[in-house]
Amino acid sequence: MAAPRMTGIRACVFDAYGTLFDVHSAVVQSRAVIGPKAEALSASWRAKQLQYTWLRSLMRRHADFWQVTGDALDFALAEHGIADPDLRTRLMESYLSLAPYPEVPACIAHLRQVGLATAILSNGTPFMLEAAVTSAGLGGQFDAILSVEAVGIYKPDPRVYQLAVDRLGLAATTVLFLSANGWDAHGARAFGLRVAWCNRFQQPDEVIPVAPDATIATLAELPGLLGL
């Protein structure tokens, strides 16, 4: 069943990694070198990357997302018995040029064409986000590219979501946040943003408070959700 249309939205704010950009495309670029462990390595890298953001936030030991990404990769490589410094360098460089999901460019262009503000709100550092946006050919398509580095703590801390409200100058109820990460979608909704969970991976609902307003399979469904 299609999600009911959402009204009153003036801006769409996107998570970056896993929502706009395919985090597993970094490993895909080196699949021939990694061999049969590629998929498992990528899954381990992503899982540990997220775990480290939460742990550092809870421990009040912040390090930026570039370091966290490297630390997570080191763990994943060790877990899978891979000792290859050149491969590590290549994978980290690949993280700066992640592939966008196929529907992303057209979706963002359509939103801007009809007059909605667009922004990114991400754990990524400013240089990581700028690199990803440029590599994906999305330069100039966002009114703001916001990084958690402005507050020094990771999602789902409410201070992160406040960045979008402050920068856009809009009421939280007029901002639609989109994330493919269920925990992020719940965090943004708990803060007070309107939220659509882009459930790319057909995950079950999270069993945590404050559910998203809507669920879509890909961002191609976003214009219909907004009645555009």
Image (spheres, grey):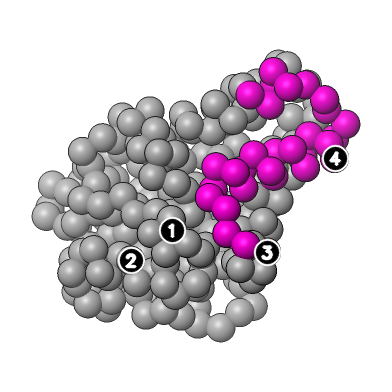
**What residue is disc 2 on?**
163
**What residue is disc 3 on?**
55
Q: CA distance from mark 4 to mark 2?
A: 36 Å
Give the camera-side residue of 49 and 177: 49
Q: CA distance from mark 4 to mark 1?
A: 28 Å
Q: Earlier in the sequence, mark 2 or mark 3?
A: 3
Residue 95 x, y percent position in the rendering: 53, 33
Magenta-drawn segment: 61-89
Q: CA distance from mark 3 to mark 1?
A: 15 Å
**What residue is disc 4 on?**
79
Q: Main secondary structure of the magenta part?
A: helix
Residues at discs 1 and 2 in contact (Cβ within 8 Å): yes
Q: CA distance from mark 4 to mark 3?
A: 19 Å
Q: CA distance from mark 2 to mark 3?
A: 21 Å
- Crowding around mark 3 (Cα neighbors within 10 Å: few <14, some 14 to 19, many 20+) is few
Give the quadrant of the N terminus: bottom left
Residue 105 x, y percent position in the rendering: 31, 38
Residues at discs 4 and 2 in contact (Cβ within 8 Å): no
Q: Earlier in the sequence, mark 4 or mark 1?
A: 4
